């Protein structure tokens, strides 16, 4: 098996010191040499369009292509992208860097210089999450695209939403896109920022979100993790209504209840309070994995713990924790064509962020195959805005290969990259110094996006489907919810952090 890690900043940008955080990646499944990645990277020359990172050689080298409408101080706001299952079209859900509005975008060729086409836009949104696939209907290929988001335009604080189109490739705007509220209960104030989507080729679509409970003592609050499902691509009048909760009968099975978080608490200069991921097994639409984070210690705790669970009956019942990691965030899940489960996460300990890729073929019954991709100081550089390294990372599986991105401290120190790394930007690895475009002038360290690709050998064994134990109740104190006014969250504003002047 082989793994490669690549710093994505091009050599021509060696002088840059941006906080290029919150990465995302899309891999064309019909040509895996074609990869698109994103981060909070402004256009180097300014202008109306923000950039994406592009690679046409499988991630070995990267350049920027400024095709995303709405360049701002950070490039775009939140941005995620996804390739169609065939045909090469790329879709994006963004928070426009100029307006802050949700934009859903399309391009038939992300490697050309033509800006992406705007299909849908509206204000009052947060954290779009884009997933796409292609299916064939009566001999015609149709791109099915799903953008999970937190829509503050929805009534009653029921903000968990999926915008979807069943044939997005060529139609004029809005190309079928419309928002569908997937929260069927009434949260105290709103749902959490992440709404995550996983799509199977048979038309099964899962969407997970966080239902906020008691916010009386905000920024401390309780929440439930909810999974919804649609069995027909989301084509009905009320999508994501096929999975009914085993207790209250509402659409959306509550996987874990009464969890605790503290909004915008900080760990290693990075804010915490909402982490979520979901993935469906491409060989069996009934097998789905979920990862989420909470503060197990409750209001008096200091932890932020990743939990991974699974369901083998289409989301109705869930296992006990298969994997937990204390003081970690940004879990990302993907499942390969031989049912190997990949888990990517970033762990904080001893003032250090460590990024780890794990793979298991037996639900973590044995120790997983694990790679430390990156480990570096969490105290430098000083954060200039939130998120510091990102509210999420992303992991994808194409066939038996895993592809992913993460962000972190870019100090050129070989000890920080146990699997090795390739830098395009200029650096002196002996003095551990970044260098400008002249390859001489020192450049301050910053936060960079990193790409990785893991390719298996013949020793990886597929999962043998087995039954799983029903999930044991999570023993937490019951919460009496007191209705309060909706908390005025403004998620798209990145507040600058003013560094403390050093002592003379």
Image: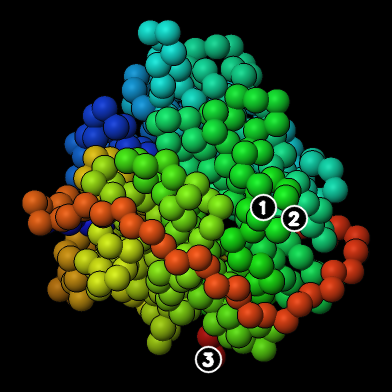
From the viewer's side, name the closer residue of 355 and 199: 199
The image shows residue 182, relative to residue 83, as above or below, that is below
Q: How many marks?
A: 3
Residue 472 is at least partly visible in this image = yes
User: Could you say where residue 399 lies in the image, as x and y percent from the top left?
Assistant: 24, 40
Disc 2 from disc 1: Cα separation: 6 Å
User: Could you say where residue 264 lies in the image, as x and y percent from the top left?
Assistant: 65, 70
Q: Residues within 10 Å of mark 2 (few under 14, many from 20)?
A: few
From the viewer's side, name the closer residue of 35 and 146: 146
The image shows residue 128, relative to residue 247, as above or below, that is above
Q: Are marks 2 and 3 in contact (CB under 8 Å)?
A: no
Q: Are marks 2 and 1 in contact (CB under 8 Å)?
A: yes
From the viewer's side, name the closer residue of 360 and 406: 360
The image shows residue 202, relative to residue 215, as above or below, that is above
Which numbered disc, 3 or 1, marks the residue closer to the eye? 1
Sequence-wise, which precedes: disc 3 or disc 1? 1
Task: Write the residue at 29% across / 32% down.
Answer: 29
Task: Write the residue at 60% across / 85% down.
Answer: 297
Which residue is the site of mark 2?
248
Disc 3 from disc 1: Cα separation: 60 Å
Q: Which structural element holds mark 2? A: loop
Q: Which mark is residue 504?
A: 3
The image shows residue 305, relative to residue 213, as above or below, that is below
Q: Which structural element holds mark 3? A: loop
Which residue is the site of mark 1?
245
User: Could you say where residue 144 lies in the image, as x and y percent from the top left?
Assistant: 49, 25
User: Could you say where residue 415 lies in the image, as x and y percent from the top left?
Assistant: 20, 76
Which numbered disc, 2 or 3, marks the residue closer to the eye? 2
């Amino acid at each position: 098996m082989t793994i490669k890690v690549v710093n994505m900043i091009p050599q021509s940008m060696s002088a840059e010191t941006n906080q290029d955080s919150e990465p995302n990646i899309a891999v064309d499944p019909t040509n895996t040499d074609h990869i698109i990645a994103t981060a909070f990277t402004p256009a180097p020359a300014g202008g109306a369009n923000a950039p994406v990172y592009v690679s046409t050689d499988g991630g070995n080298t990267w350049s920027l292509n400024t095709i995303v409408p709405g360049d701002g101080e950070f490039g775009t706001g939140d941005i995620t992208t996804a390739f169609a299952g065939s045909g090469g079209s790329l879709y994006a859900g963004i928070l426009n860097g100029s307006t802050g509005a949700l934009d859903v975008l399309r391009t038939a060729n992300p490697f050309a210089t033509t800006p992406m086409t705007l299909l849908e836009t509206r204000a009052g949104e947060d954290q779009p999450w884009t997933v796409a696939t292609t299916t064939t209907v009566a001999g015609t290929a149709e791109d099915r695209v799903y953008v999970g988001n937190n829509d503050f335009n929805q009534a009653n604080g029921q903000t968990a939403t999926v915008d979807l189109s069943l044939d997005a490739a060529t139609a004029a705007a809005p190309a079928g896109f419309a928002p569908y509220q997937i929260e069927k209960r009434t949260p105290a104030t709103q749902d959490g920022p992440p709404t995550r989507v996983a799509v199977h080729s048979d038309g099964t679509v899962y969407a997970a979100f966080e239902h906020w409970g008691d916010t009386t003592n905000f920024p401390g609050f309780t929440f439930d993790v909810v999974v919804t499902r649609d069995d027909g691509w989301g084509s009905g009048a009320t999508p994501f209504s096929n999975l009914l909760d085993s207790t209250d009968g509402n659409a959306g099975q509550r996987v874990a209840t009464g969890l605790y978080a503290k909004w915008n608490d900080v760990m290693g200069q990075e804010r915490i309070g909402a982490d979520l991921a979901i993935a469906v097994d491409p060989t069996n639409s009934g097998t789905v994995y979920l990862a989420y984070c909470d503060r197990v210690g409750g209001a008096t705790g200091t932890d932020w713990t990743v939990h991974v669970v699974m369901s083998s009956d289409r989301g109705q019942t869930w296992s006990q924790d298969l994997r937990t990691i204390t003081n970690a965030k940004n879990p990302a899940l993907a499942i390969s064509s031989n049912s190997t489960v990949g888990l990517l996460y970033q762990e904080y300990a001893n003032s250090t962020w460590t990024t780890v890729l794990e793979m298991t073929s037996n639900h973590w019954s044995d120790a997983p195959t694990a790679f430390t991709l990156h480990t570096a100081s969490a105290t430098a550089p000083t954060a200039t805005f939130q998120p510091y390294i990102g509210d999420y990372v992303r992991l994808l599986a194409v066939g038996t290969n895993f592809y992913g991105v993460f962000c972190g401290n870019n100090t050129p120190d070989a000890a920080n990259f146990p699997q090795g790394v390739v830098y395009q930007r200029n650096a002196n690895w002996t003095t551990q110094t970044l260098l400008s475009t002249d390859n001489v002038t020192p450049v301050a360290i910053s936060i960079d996006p990193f790409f990785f690709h893991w390719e298996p050998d013949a020793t990886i064994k597929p999962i043998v489907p087995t039954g799983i134990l029903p999930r044991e109740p999570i023993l937490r104190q019951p919460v009496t919810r007191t209705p309060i006014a909706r908390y005025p969250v403004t998620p798209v504003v990145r507040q600058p952090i003013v560094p403390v002047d050093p002592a003379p």
